[in-house]
Image: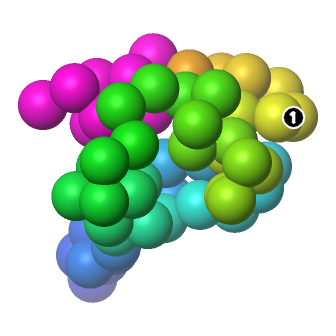
Amino acid sequence: MTSSPPQDPLVCLCAPVPESVVLAARASGVRDVPALRRPTAASTGWGDCLTDLEELLNE
């Protein structure tokens, strides 16, 4: 039995921040990771998600 991918995958594991939160922030005008960190704490731990966050914010 295979598992299906999550509907709202975590982009940042240490915070944890799902993709939907990043996309909602982008929709409200957030365009860079420092601005995303304030409300979500994304990319404040390990930082492995930095590239993924930047890509989502700049799509």
Q: Is residue 55 above or below residue 1?
A: above
Q: Quadrant of the C terminus?
A: top left
Overall secondary structure of the magenta section: helix
Q: Quadrant of residue 48?
A: top right
Q: Quadrant of residue 57?
A: top left
The residue pinned by badge 1 equals 45
Q: Residue at x 82, y 34 (%)?
A: 44
Q: Quadrant of the N terminus?
A: bottom left
Which portion, as a residue range, is magenta? 51-59
Q: Residue at x 57, y 43 (%)?
A: 36
Frontmost residue, 3 versus 26: 26
Q: Quadrant of residue 28?
A: bottom left
Query: How is the rendered protein coloured?
Result: rainbow
Frontmost residue, 20 versus 3: 20
Q: Is residue 11 above or below residue 6?
A: above
Q: Is residue 29 above or below residue 20?
A: above
Q: Is residue 12 left or right of residue 22?
A: right
Q: Is residue 39 left or right of residue 21?
A: right
Quick one: label 1, few (<14), some, or many (20+) residues within 10 Å? few
